Image (cartoon, rainbow, N blue to C red):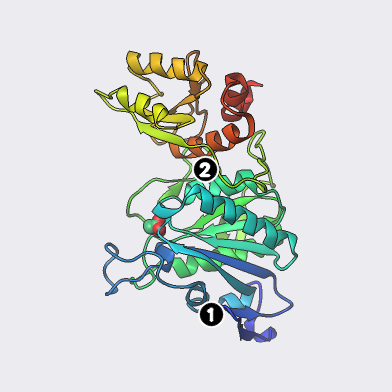
Amino acid sequence: MRFSSSLVAISTAVFANGVTAASNSSLPRVSIIATGGTIAGTNSDSTSTTGYKAGSLGVDALIEAVPALSNISSVSGIQFSNIGSQNMNTSLLLRLTKLATNVAANGSADGIVITHGTDTLEETAMFLDLTYNESLPIAMAAAMRPSTALSADGPFNIYEAVALAGSKEAADRGVMIVLNDRIGSAMYTTKTNTRAVDTFKAAEQGYLGVFNDEVPVFYFEPSRVYKKPFFDVSGVDALPRVDILYGNIDMDVRLLNYSVSSGAEGVVIACAGDASLPDAWADAAQAFTEQGIPVVRASRTGSGYVAPADDTLTSGNFNPQKARILLQLVLNEHGGKNSTLIQEYFDPYLS
Ligand code: SIN
């Protein structure tokens, strides 16, 4: 333990919004922003890990479930939303990054934890990492088992995320994902398994670090994803619609046509293998890209680099759902006409 609980005087306060905070001025101040998910989920019995209601506990209950937080931090809670992360959307993401930026800018915290559902955690993490430009760390915590389950993983993940967000070593590392004793990069970490607690991985890039009890142990100095861009969305209320279409044998090109005719300003295709497309799709994708509706080939395989192609854009190291987030932000900033410029965001090694 880095802090002896006998040496610190802990007081608890209940704020007007009903949030309980453990406060001690000598400890790092960590603001926990709760968005919902299984980590805040409850079920009728302790042995069911399916069929539960995500997002039923408030941030006060999440904090109270981990009394040991008061040994390592002075935590406060903000209830941002209480949703299953399948209901996260662009409008909420824009508000979330503004909230995190405000918390960082107003000096009320030394670190931020965001609790979130695991299903779309990687998309929110990437969005925040591309739109949040403060040195105050953000550690995202989630859980695969609801709070009522035997061996619920949420409390320990929150504990480690708070320890990470409050540690000096976390500064200038942007947004990180904390589950199962690992620290993952927001840009590359993805959910790889529907049920397993050990589901978040980055097959190509690996982890940033682990925990020794609550002490984060980083493998690298603070570093940036190669030429990682920053998108200022402080004045932005909406982003262009980008669809993802799934590749398979017999894929019908009318899906791509419909996507564009119904308003998508860009399309990502989760293609088979090394992002191959049937001829009819390749032709249509090239035509749309040339018209300023970029079509990005990504891979449905789950890992691997997709190299540039002549006819369409390609996703580089990003999976389809992460490529979609990046394309939304690039389209918002530059529009869809300059495909060379857009490709450089996906593949910065080229320029
Ligand atoms: C969700 O993503 O909100 C539900 C699933 C989970 O958190 O594991």
Which residue is farthest front? Answer: 262
- Asked whether the viewer can see residue 230, the reply is yes
Q: Residue at x 56, y 29 (%)?
A: 346
Q: Quadrant of ligand 1?
A: bottom left
Rendering coords of residue 2 (x, y %): 65, 72
- Asked whether the viewer can see residue 212, the reply is no
Could you tell whether 122 is left or right of 131 in the image? left
- Secondary structure under tag 2 reads loop
Rendering coords of residue 139 (x, y %): 58, 58
**Of residues 207 and 34, which is closer to you in this image?**
34
How many numbered marks are there?
2
- Secondary structure under tag 1 reads loop
> What's the amino acid at mark 2?
Gly
Q: Is residue 198 above or below residue 324?
A: below
> What's the amino acid at mark 1?
Pro
Residue identified by numbered label 2: 206
Q: Residues within 10 Å of mark 1 (few under 14, many from 20)?
A: few
Q: Quadrant of residue 165?
A: bottom right
Q: Earlier in the sequence, mark 1 or mark 2?
A: 1
Could you tell whether 44 is left or right of 114 in the image? left
Which mark is on residue 67? 1
Q: Quadrant of residue 264?
A: top left
Q: Nearer the viewer, mark 1 or mark 2?
A: 1
Q: Residue at x 51, y 32 (%)?
A: 317
Q: Is residue 62 above or below residue 251?
A: below
Label 2 beta carbon less than 8 Å to ligand 1: no
Which residue is farthest left? Answer: 250
